[in-house]
């Protein structure tokens, strides 16, 4: 695992209002809301770091967690892996270190991902995204 | 405001256990727990980004928030400003955009800071740290 974080994803009650806050209010750069199965908005920050906003309900479906874990964690820390093998290796490393796996590893339209909760339930997502690594 | 985030600070129940998880388990680089009024542990990630761990109780004193806000937000997003004037300017920009100020701007042993909650209560800290900007 490289010492890096690629995304921070946060849950918001009102996506349009929060995009206005970050885009128009604070001036953070974005291409705006991306419509889809799960509308979201991606802000491109320095060094490729991204702040991502999801509506709370869709965020909860992203987290796939019990209500109990979700309650303690309004965010997801994301790491972009170089390969499927790195996703699996980091997940195993985390589990050996005491993490709790969330859901199962899965193939996604955009790649492959694994999720785990750290000892306090903070949600990490490890993804391989061949299209836009 | 530059499009950047400098720190992500998270609350943990057991600092030693969580440091072991991130340091020994995941292999993230750190000088270990820094003892002080508020023990914490700082992980140095790529591009100067830092993941910072505080015990939950001390984290809550950092956030200076009501229990209601604290409940919804297990993390603080931090931005390092270039000057006191930039701290003040960003705070004003955020308030005009609909943020709620948390506490008051204050002089700290290490500099100067302002805090606000975004429309969902996500906590931002804007700091000027002349010593270790």
Image (cartoon, coloured by chain):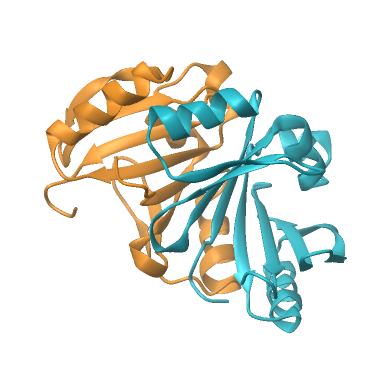
Chain colours: A cyan, B orange
Q: Quadrant of the N terminus of chain A?
A: bottom right
B104 horizontally vs A32: left or right: left
A75 horizontally vs B122: left or right: right
Q: Nearer the viewer, residue A37 or B30?
A: A37
B70 horizontally vs A12: left or right: left
* Residue A14 visible at all: yes
- Report x, y in % for residue B84: 13, 34
B112 up-or-down from A102: above or below: above
B59 up-or-down from B133: above or below: above
A15 up-or-down from B2: above or below: above
* Residue B11 visible at all: no
B119 up-or-down from A113: above or below: above
Q: Quadrant of the C terminus of chain A?
A: bottom right
Q: Quadrant of residue A69?
A: top right
Residue at (70%, 75%) from the top-left corner?
A130
Residue at (38%, 57%) from the top-left corner?
A46
- Report x, y in % for residue B71: 60, 25
- Report x, y in % for residue B120: 56, 24
Q: Nearer the viewer, residue A119 or B121?
A: B121
Q: Quadrant of residue B17?
A: bottom right
Residue at (77%, 37%) from the top-left corner?
A58
B122 horizontally vs A53: left or right: left
- Report x, y in % for residue A100: 77, 58
* Labels in figure, total: 0
């Amino acid at each position: 695992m490289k010492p890096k974080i690629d995304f921070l994803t946060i849950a918001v009650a009102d996506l349009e209002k929060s995009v206005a806050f970050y885009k128009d209010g604070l001036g953070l750069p974005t291409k705006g809301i991306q419509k889809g199965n799960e509308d979201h908005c991606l802000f491109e920050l320095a060094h490729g770091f991204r702040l991502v906003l999801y509506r709370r309900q869709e965020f909860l479906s992203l987290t796939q967690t019990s209500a109990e874990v979700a309650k303690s964690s309004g965010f997801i820390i994301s790491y972009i892996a170089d390969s499927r093998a790195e996703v699996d290796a980091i997940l195993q490393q985390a589990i050996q270190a005491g993490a709790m796996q969330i859901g199962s590893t899965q193939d996604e339209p955009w790649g492959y991902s694994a999720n785990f909760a750290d000892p306090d339930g903070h949600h990490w997502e490890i993804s391989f995204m061949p299209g836009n690594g």
